Image (cartoon, helix red, strand yellow):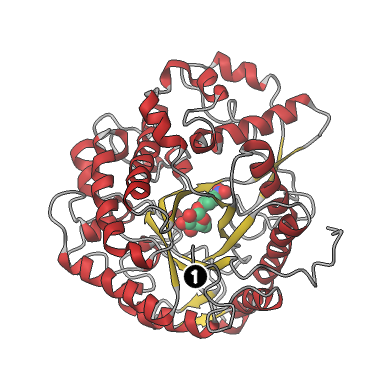
Amino acid sequence: PTYDTDLNSAQLPGNFIWGLASSAYQVEGAAKDEGKGPSIWDLIAHRDYGVVADNSTGDVVASHYYLYKQDFARLANLGVPYFSPSFSWPRFFPFGNGPVNEEGVAHYDDVIASMVALGIKPAVTLFHWDTPLALFNSYGAWTDSRIVDDFFNYATFVISRYDQYVPIWYTFNEPQYCNWQYSVYHAGNAKGLYPAYHGITGGLKARIACSHFTILAHAKVSKWYHEVFKGKGRITFKNSGNYYEPNNTASAADIDAVARQYEFILGWFGGCWRDGDYSPMLKATLGSMLPTFTQAEKDMIKGSCDFYAIDGYTGYIGYGIDGGSAACAANSSAPGYPECAGSSSVGADGFPLGPAADNGVNWLWSTPVAIRKFLNTITKELFPTIPDIVVSEFGFAEPFEGQQKSLPAILWDLRRADYYQGFLDNILAAKVEDGVNVTGAFGWAIYDNFEWFAGSSVKFGMQYLNQTSLERYPKASMFQFLDWFAQKGGARLGSSKAGGNESV
Ligand code: PNW
């Protein structure tokens, strides 16, 4: 890509927030320890051999539950100012609701205290897919309206306890995952292996309900947060989405396919920026299958996001399907992908300027310029009222890393290093050249972890995790990531700029 300005001399403002991210089930381990209740992921990983690619589980992973102090010490030594973990709902409330688990509370008290002592600022996600199993078993979790009050109970407990230390709260990680393939929020029919609990099959009805109650749960917590902790910190949720470029910018079908992708992925959860309601396209497509919000709910949703957070990893070419809109409408009893959302297929080389995806992750191409275009699309075209946007996750899986045995080779992860350099340059270009108010960027992940259905066969870490000794070794990409921020003047922990905007 070419840039109009000299990006080498462009500098980040001191209040740009940056750091590394992770999530509870993916790193903590200690799955049965100190009073934690099971989540749906304990079920998924254990119940059916073969559901997770390499049959790994979250039982141990990096044992972050016990080794958090050394993890934070390293982050501090490397000068990383923010860390974005998620907290485990079933550690606080083993049954999802009911009695609180004091051991879990004491644990997170010390997690927060340890970060604060080192000056690391937490950006905490309250829910990253580890739904308490008890709620799944008793009423089907996200398919039932009762989840809204149970999440509210958990979220308000945690926020009340740690508010003064946490400048950023994310209620949900990627509610889009209510809707995609495996319904990771409620384990409904993951890979077709589960019986239909409470009528939940992971089908469209369950997915729509999950999305609906997630939006309401977020909005209810956000409203409470704004009333009780006015002006103290910021709250939003993390969206999952990627950039789509029409294959042929003169093709109405390709343009239509891209528009439908955005509406079905980001528009579904875009009520914060659109009068609190579902988009017209969603309503037109899903008709009576789509639940409605009351006016009071719409008002609550509209004001419930203080900024936009996007987990944006890659970019695709959008191809129209012959008669795509018509095929979607004709199939109106169960409109779904790909007819309604437009094709997500990509060319052999993925997004232009990106190399082929030989990394074993079929959705992830290294497409640096896509993040620049995506930030423009989100803030200027899709949701022009967004005040500022944070890239809350981005990262890359190094080709063949899962199979590599030799440590030096694993640590020399040049494709990932290149990905971070390219993405960060393009995030900066969006800011300084295009005027996008992008205010933060978080790399995924702090180290190799449990990659959901891919288990430990796919690695996203900027540190290698030895799964036997549990030692963590920084990879080349970690230093690339850190060097980039050092060059661009990103506030580092321990530097005079550290802390950035104290009012945040
Ligand atoms: C994120 N996509 O999920 C999750 O928040 C993490 O838990 C996960 O480990 C990480 O990305 C890497 O996979 C995504 O298909 C999964 O575009 C898939 C997509 C995006 C995000």
> Residue lying farthest top?
330
Position of 385 with respect to 4 (left or right) is left
Residue at 18% x, 69% y is: 103
Residue that label 1 marks: 82
Q: Which residue corresponds to the image point at 46% horizontal and 60% vertical from the top-left? A: 451
| Residue 418 image position (x, y, % from top left) | 71, 69
For image coordinates 49% across by 48% down, the residue present is: 306
Q: Is mark 1 on a helix, strand or loop?
A: strand
How busy is the neighbourhood of tag 1: few (under 14 within 10 Å), some, or many (20 plus)?
many
Near-viewer residue (486 or 417): 486
Horizontal side, residue 74 vs residue 14: left or right: left
Q: In which quarter of the image is residue 489?
A: bottom right
| Amino acid marked by disc 1 | Tyr
- Could you tell whether 364 is left or right of 352 in the image? left
Quadrant, the N terminus: bottom right
Examine the rendering and report whether any part of residue 448 can be seen. no
Please tell me whether residue 395 is drawn above or below residue 65 in the rendered image: above
Give the image location of residue 412, x and y in percent. Answer: 64, 79
Q: Nearer the viewer, residue 26 or 431?
A: 431
